[in-house]
Image (cartoon, rainbow, N blue to C red):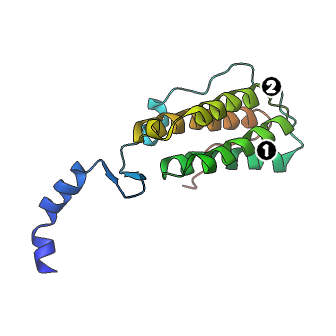
Amino acid sequence: MIIFFMLKPQIRTILDQIISAKFPGGWELSFGKSKIDLPSTQRNPPESGNVGSLTSDKVANIFWLGYDVMWSVDATLRGADKSRILHGVRQSIHHASEVGLAGMAEQLGEIYETISAAKEAEISAEWRDQLAIKLNRIADQIGAITEKYQNDFRPNPSVNS
């Protein structure tokens, strides 16, 4: 234990240099280098294209749309196989359609086709990172759209002085 603490700076330097680890069976684990982790001011803002008109009374579908998109991001970055990622995106398409966001469902459909067409050899850490960024843009769109439907929406908690 004492040796660990004495060598802690050197160990930290070595660990910081590890970008990813490949394991038997072809799966890969990447460490802290995902562009999705950049502060939102460094990412592209949500696209304001025609995503459809939200049916705001379908609150369960709105919840599950956001949840399934973020679940898909998580599965992508954690190295899930294609079938798991496709499941999350397919669920997202369903919920986007249910709440009237046909344009968003179309965007998700294009992402679904991209994933379906990808060969296992193409699914690298960079590929996953780019996919996660595309999905996160859709999550940002969901937030921007739903905020418009709540007049008293406050993005941050108030602090009592």
Looking at the rendered image, the quarter that the C terminus falls into is: bottom right
Q: Quadrant of residue 39?
A: top left
Residue at figure coordinates x 12%, y 60% from the top left: 10
Residue at figure coordinates x 57%, y 53% from the top left: 159
Q: Is residue 60 left or right of residue 5?
A: right
Q: Is residue 100 visible?
A: yes
Looking at the rendered image, the quarter that the N terminus falls into is: bottom left
* Residue 62's disc number: 1
Residue at figure coordinates x 75%, y 49% from the top left: 64
Q: Is residue 26 left or right of residue 136?
A: left
* Label 1: element kind: helix
The foreground one among 118 and 84 is 118
What amino acid is at disc 2? Gly
Q: Residue 122: x and y, percent?
A: 45, 35
Residue assigned mark 2: 52
Q: Residue 94: x and y, percent?
A: 80, 41
Q: Residue furthest top?
A: 49
- Count residues near mark 2 (Cα–Cα under 10 Å), then give few for <14, some for 14-19, many for 20+: some
Q: Residue 84: x and y, percent?
A: 62, 51
The foreground one among 125 and 7 is 125
Q: Is residue 79 left or right of residue 73?
A: left
* Label 2: element kind: loop
What amino acid is at disc 1? Ile
